[in-house]
Amino acid sequence: MKYVDEYRDGDKARDIAAAIAAEVQPDRSYAFMEFCGGHTHAISRYGIEDLLPKNVRMIHGPGCPVCVLPIGRIDDAIRLAKRPEVTLCTYADLMRVPASGGLSLMKAKAAGADIRMVYSSLDAIRIAEANPERQVVFFAIGFETTTPPTAVALKTAEAKGLKNFSIYCNHVLTPVAMRAILEMPPTPDEPPIAIEGFVGPSHVSAIIGMEPYRVFARDYHKPVVISGFEPLDVMYSILMLVRQVNEQRSEVENQYIRAVKTEGNRVAIDLCDEVFELRESFEWRGLGAVPKSALKLRDAYAFYDAEKRFTVETQPAEDNPACECGAILRGQKKPADCRLFGTVCTPETPTGACMVSSEGACAAHWTYGRFRHRETNSALRKSA
Amino acid sequence: MTKTFRRKLDFKAGRVDMSHGAGGRAMAELISSIFKDAFGNELLEQGNDQASFPTPSGGRMVMTTDGYVVSPIFFPGGDIGSLAVHGTVNDLAMAGAKPLYLSASYIIEEGFPLGDLKRIADSMGAAAKAAGVMIVTGDTKVVERGKADGVFISTAGVGVVPDGINLSGDRARPGDKVIVSGSMGDHGVAIMSSRENLTFETEILSDSAALNGLVDAMVAAAGPHLRLMRDPTRGGLAATLNELAHQSGVGFRIVEDHIPIKRQVAAACELLGLDPLNVANEGKLVAVVAAEAAEGLLAAMRSHPLGAEAAIIGEAVEDDQRFVQMTTGFGGGRIVDWLAGEQLPRIC
């Protein structure tokens, strides 16, 4: 544990907090978006908000793969899982996401569908090998971090000659989503968000490197600091962002040098290029249809594509109109701004995906931070 | 377009899913809206892991029942047989009772190896003897292959409460101290390390143990200052403190750095993305005690082998919202919540 304890040291945290407090200009405010759900989780779990000056605000971004997956895609997965010949393998986070008709993967499992929770894409390969009579579908989701393991699973299946394995691909791309956030037009009832810089993804950047973020520094004049997931990483990255803003710089800086190289991971990038290609467009919860924002299997690997093997045709599905997941994923609202938060929507009875995943802004705020809004909580309880 | 709006507990078409057995709010809701409705009485309303009641001939008794479905049946540091004794004895002991008699019902799947069954029964017998209780009645059922998973054990237990002892989950008061008897999360991590789909190597053993001896020492040391005890099994310390906060109508403030957690347990949890405070224990207890008796109780616990690593981790506070709040080692504050949904089924 030593390797991680040193990034959670309370004394060092206080030192960095003092540095941030000393360097922020008291007459202005700072608003930074942490793109990744992993950062949102760290900020909530370690109480980082308590260590920041009042005029430094963190805006939670859309980097929670479970949260941005639209309901229609979960509906597809449930339909796949209900086929008698299919065993659906999924990461546990997805099990409780509300789908259409009051369903979820967990409820579909309780009703008899063969759904297995896996910890890695290779677990799905093992299940396919052990059950040759079953059609094993791997429900692949995630940003650039989890894309290479899916590619490895596919190549492994190919090498083993596994005919009963396929991939339901929902991999999405980080830089495209960051751009979509910055390009978002303000709407009458949602204020524009003034993001002054990004706490950049850690594991995603370990794959894609630093280059893909240059556009934000150069064209949008937004500083980006690639940050590790440990709380001291986040604190130090915030300090680096404050310094860039104070010095009117907008650069891509790398706080996470122990894992992120400028050029990324070439082997992983090449493997993904070989296996995947861009979708014309992909629907994101909160961001809508975003062109060239997601991946599908190349034609050469169509055999392993569950969407082709089982002809999946995604039907649009409506979010609960009272659910603010969309605005929260765009950074326009905070979890406590949603009138469902903590009343009908809790981690046990989620209305939207942001309350399900541990990386979701609502789940993180509910699980770790809701004591900060006692008055709101009381008002909510009275009105509930 | 299809609607996705949330629906309430649906008795017509709804089904039990794994979250209903995970020890969190979903299970609490299931118990409340099905079993409490059906069985309702004032003893059940106590909401403890055991019921405490006066006997017609004077004195007080406690009674408890428990089902064991742990997978795998044999795990590092124990097996389903010894676990069944420890879990039942501990539920009695948490009321301050002296555990006396247990029952044992076995539901066995066709095809289960007789040698394994004997090994489990021997282990159960030895655990009972060591804990000073007798297994005085039992039942045996065999179901067809595929209708169970190896063997399930169901127990009941009774014990007697010494005069002057009145422990209940609703007795924590602001200012009381919270003590844990040792390191958190050992049992859950030991079980996880032996699951076939989660192969990782660790030397962590389950902490499965009967706590009645430790409880005797605690009752002797703190007497009426002892407000309540509970064993943080499923859902771990987090679930237990939340239950107690709601039962007692208080909040708790605890300090992360004061909670004993073994390095290997912390490392395994890190790897699996779990919080050790949500992970099950089978040989640990949480005690709430009046502040003036806390140091004396702590010393008594530390001089017992099962309480050697006991620590004061925080205190009860006034809080109309019943939050369990923790100062993190990092210096910030956060809530320690029940875990939503399923962390790991069949932990006990």
Image (spheres, coloured by chain):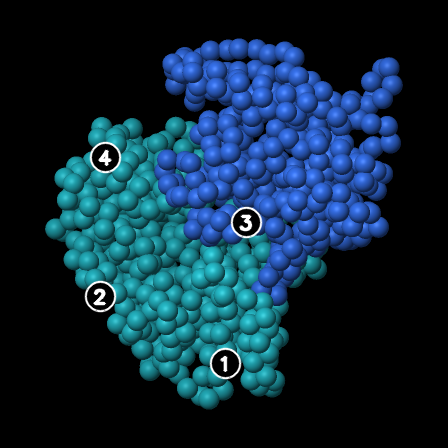
**Mark 1 is on which residue type?**
Val
Residue B54: horizontal and vertical position, in percent? 83, 21
**Mark 2 is on which residue type?**
Arg
Give the left or right position of residue B180, taking residue A169 as reference: right
Query: Chain under label 1?
Result: A
Mark number for residue B262? 3
- What's the residue at 66%, 44% (across, down)? B308
| Distance of label 1 from label 4 (alpha carbons) | 52 Å
Residue A295: horizontal and vertical position, in percent? 25, 56
Q: Do dots 4 and 3 share one subunit?
A: no
| Distance of label 3 from label 2 (alpha carbons) | 38 Å
Mark number for residue A266? 2
Identity of the residue furthest to the bottom in this view: A247
Give the left or right position of residue A58, taking residue A183 as reference: right
Q: Nearer the viewer, mark 1 or mark 4?
A: 4
Residue corresponding to mark 1: A242
Query: Chain under label 2?
Result: A
- What's the residue at 43%, 51% (across, down)? B271
Q: Secondary structure at mark 1?
A: helix
- What's the residue at 39%, 44% (across, down)? B200
Q: Secondary structure at mark 3?
A: loop
- What's the residue at 16%, 57% (across, down)? A274
**Mark 3 is on which residue type?**
Lys
Chain drawn in cyan? A
Residue B158: horizontal and vertical position, in percent? 71, 20
